[in-house]
Amino acid sequence: MFNNVYRYLRTDDWLDSKVPFMISVALLSYLYIDNNISCIDMYLSVGAYFLYVSMFLAFSYVINDFTDMEIDKKAGKKKVMHKLPKPVIVITMIALVFVGVLPMFAIVVEKVSYLVYTLVLYIAGSAYSVPYLLRFKERGFIGLIECSVAQRCMPLIPIVFLFPINWIFLGVFIILSFVNGIRYILIHQAIDYENDIKTGVKTYVSEGHNKYKAYVFAAFFIECLLFIEIFAWLAMHRFYVLCVLLLYCVFELIIDTVVKKYMKTNLFCTFIAVPLEALYNVFFPIMAAILLTIENYAYCGILAFLIIITFKPFKGKFAFVIRFCKIKRKKKKESYRR
């Protein structure tokens, strides 16, 4: 039962790859502005924001699968949704909205602005796949922009309803998220290329835009520059964050070696080990939670929570390190035998 719900909500597509980074942006936005809220209010804010972004992303994926149901069946895809009556699917989507929206509504001060923005957010999240809302999925490069804005950038804005923030600080993260979103969507469309051609779905990549690889590399380069700026700014306050960056670089170098040298796979255009993924969704969120906990040990519960939700992606990436060590050990033994 749990596995079916997990697959139905497509949790693997957002819990590991989007939510931890969004939580880290909220934590850093709070940490580096003079906020004066109680420990309990902070826990409530983080919990409500987690539900808000999680349920929104789940809703976005469910409505995408709902509108693409016949197309997916035609492509031979088998999903949990295909076994459910349509009224049940609609009810679950409504439930996702309420579970995500109500907790934050209960604690924010500007309730009307919050509800208006949330309505716009859900419309934008639906517009990528719903035909009556333009179905941006089939609108070429404009579709890439819309999806990245809706799924990566707009969920960060509600942080302003929780506590005062520095807009320049948040703006850098919004730009970073936007560029990262473009890169991920291009990779996703490249992977789905054959199915999209088979079913007649017109995406930016399926329409024959071969320059998408150049855009993937360009997005990666821009993200690196933005992360350098972010870490430089953080290091001005806490020098030891550079240790996190150094540790990540070693980690990424090992993954890069395994994927390219031993697996003979293109690192940039598959989801096997997307460059910077471990930084976005493991190292950076944990670093943010550690910085918060150092300021106030009462926040160790938030750190523990982030460790739990980032454990699976970390385990997946650490498997490359284990494989690297095994290969090196094997080669070392073979050299001794010679």
Image: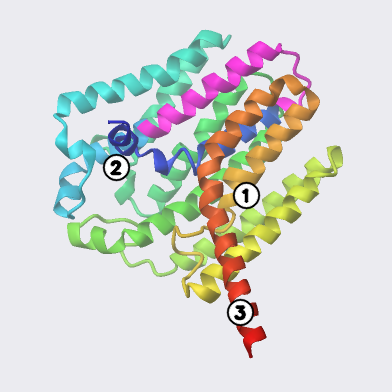
Q: Element at badge 1?
A: helix
Would you say the magenta stretch is mainly helix, strand or loop?
A: helix
Q: Element at badge 2?
A: loop
Where does the image place residue 230, in percent across and percent down from the top left?
A: 73, 45
Does residue 236 appear to the left or right of 210 in the view shown?
right
Q: What stretch is highlighted in magenta?
A: 30-58
Does residue 296 appear to the left or right of 204 in the view shown?
right
The circle on residue 135 is 2
Which color scheme is applied? rainbow
Compare marks 1 and 3 and give the one earlier in the sequence.
Answer: 1
Question: How far separated are the C-alphas under marks 1 and 3?
Answer: 29 Å
Compare marks 2 and 1 and give the one earlier in the sequence.
Answer: 2
Front disc: 2 or 3 = 3
Q: Is residue 26 visible?
A: no
Question: How far separated are the C-alphas under marks 2 and 1?
Answer: 32 Å
* Type of the residue with mark 3: Lys
Residue depicted at x 24% and y 59% = 195
Determine which residue is flagged by label 1. Answer: 279
* Type of the residue with mark 2: Arg
Compare marks 2 and 3 and give the one earlier in the sequence.
Answer: 2
Residue depicted at x 64% and y 12% = 41
For this rendering, which residue is in front, 208 or 296?
A: 296
Q: Quadrant of residue 135?
A: top left
Give above or below for 26 relative to 34: below
Does residue 91 appear to the left or right of 228 in the view shown?
left
The circle on residue 207 is none
Determine which residue is flagged by label 3. Answer: 331
